[in-house]
Amino acid sequence: MGGLRKKKHPKSRTAAFKASEPSEIAEAPHTFVIHRGLSCPYITDLTIDFRRVMEPFTAISLREKKMNRIKDFVSLSSFFHVSHMGIFNKASTQLSFKVLRLPRGPSLTFKVHQFTLARDVISLSKHQFIDDDHFKHAPLVVMNNFTGEGKHLKLMATTFQNMFPSINLAQVNIGTIRRCVMFSYNPDTKLVEMRHYSVQAVPVGLKRSVQKIIKGRVPNLNQCEELAEFVTRDGYASESEAEDDEQSHVLLAQTLKGRGNLEGSKSSVKLHEIGPRLTMQLIKIEEGLLTGEVLYHDHITKTEEEKEELRKLIEKKRKLKEQRKKEQTENRARNLKQKTKMAKREANDNASEDEDDAAYYEEEVGEKPDEELFKNEKKSSSRKRPKLPGAMKYNKNNKKPKKETKAK
C-alpha cells in the first residue's frame, strides 16, 4: 500500500488552478450572487436573473443553505478567484442589495425600491428577442450621469464597472458584444436604475421583401409569377426603415452574426430589453467587509468629533480581537507542549516498568526473558472489554433453565 498523499496548501492549489486556465478567464472578475433573510420565491427568481446578467463569470448553479455564512463564501473566493459578491437581503420591511468587494471591502448597501423579473419584462415586450448564445460572453457596461459632487458617486460607478471585465477597444471582437447593462443615476431622486438589453444588428437600406429573403424566411409568392416581381413590388416597401433613428445606423467594421451584417455594410443597432429591472438607492458605504468605518451614509450625518470617536472605538475592538487571537495561539502552543511532555513521561514510565519486570523475571527464573514477552502482556492488558449494547449486564444467575426431556 502506498503512503498517504500530502494535502497541498490552499494558495498552491489556487496558483495551479489559475495556471491551468487562460489568462482572460483567470484575470476576469468573478461573482457570487446569493440571497439572505426571509424566504420569498420572487427574491429567489431575482437572484437567478441577476446571475444571468453576470454570466459567464459567475456561479449560475450556486447552491446555498441557511446554515452557510458570508465567511464560508469569502473563504472559497480565493480558490475560484471571485472578486465581488452580490447579496439580496429580504427583511420584513424592505429589500436591500449589497455589493461586496472581496476579500477586504468596501461594502455598498442599496435599498431596492422596485424590481421586475426577467420573465415579466420579456412577456411585456412586443418583439421578444433572446438567444442563449448571448450569455456566452460578458455584457457591455454603460454608465450614465454618474458625475457630480461626492466621492460616493465615483466609488459607486467604479464598483459597477469592476464587476464586469474590461474591454480592449483595439482587440475586441464586435461579434462577442451581444448584451448591454446600463446603470443610470438620477441626481434629483438619488435613484440608480439598472436595465439589461440584448443587442441586435439589422441591415439598413433594404426593402422589406429583401430582408425576409436575407433572414431566411419563406415569402408568400401566390400573387407573383416570379421572384423578381415580389422584390420590386411597391407594396412591400420597408416601414421600419422610415421609423428607425439615423443615430442608430453604424458602418460595420467586422462581419457580425446574422445575415446581411457584412463588413463595410450599414446596419441599425437595436436593443431588446430582456430584464431584470432594478431601481435602488445607495444607503451606506462601509470600509471593510460589512464592518469597519462608515464612509458614507444617506440618512445619518456625523461631525468630525463623532467620526473620530467611532474610529477609536473600531481601533480598540480591532486590538482586542488581535489580542484574543494571540492568546489563543499561545494557549494552543502551551497545551501542545504539555501533551508532548505527558506522552514522553508515560513512555518513560512504561519503559522503566518493563525493565523492572524483566529484572525480576531474570532473578527468579535465572535466565533472560524474551523481548516480546512483556510487550505482548502490555498489549493484552491495554485491550478493553467491549460494552454490551443498551448498557446490558451479563449475570450467570439469569440463565434460562433448560427444559427437562422425558425419557421414552
Image: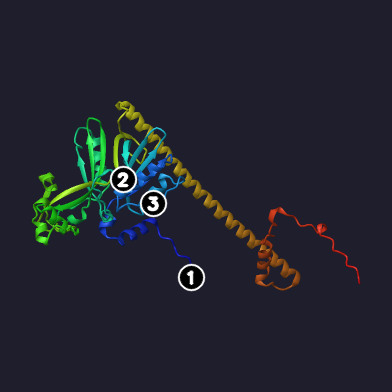
Q: Residues within 10 Å of mark 3 (few under 14, many from 20)?
A: few
Is the residue marked by circle 2 packed among few (<14), some (14-19), or many (20+) residues within 10 Å?
many
Query: Can you say which quadrant of the picture contains the C terminus?
Result: bottom right
Q: Where is residue 187 in the image (x, y as percent from the top left)?
A: 22, 32
Give the x, y percent position of residue 240: 14, 47
N-terminal of the two: label 1 or label 3? 1
Task: Check contact, mark 1 vs mark 3: CB within 8 A.
Answer: no
Q: Nearer the viewer, residue 267 or 215?
A: 215
Q: Say which residue label 1 marks.
A: 2
Q: How far apart are marks 1 and 3 (CA)?
A: 36 Å
Helix, strand, or loop for circle 2? Answer: helix
Residue 336 appears in the picture as rendered? yes
- Which is more toward the observer, 247 or 177? 247
Helix, strand or loop at mark 1 = loop
On the image, numbered disc 2 is attached to which residue? Answer: 118
Q: How far apart are marks 1 and 2 (CA)?
A: 54 Å
Which amino acid type corresponds to the residue marked 2 in the rendered image? Ala
Q: In the structure shown, which secondary structural element does the residue marked by tag 3 occupy?
A: loop
Earlier in the chain: of badge 1 and badge 2, it is 1
Task: Give the mark nearest the N terminus, 2 or 3.
Answer: 3
Measured along the vertical axis of the image, is residue 170 above or below residue 43?
Answer: below
Say what amino acid the circle numbered 1 marks: Gly
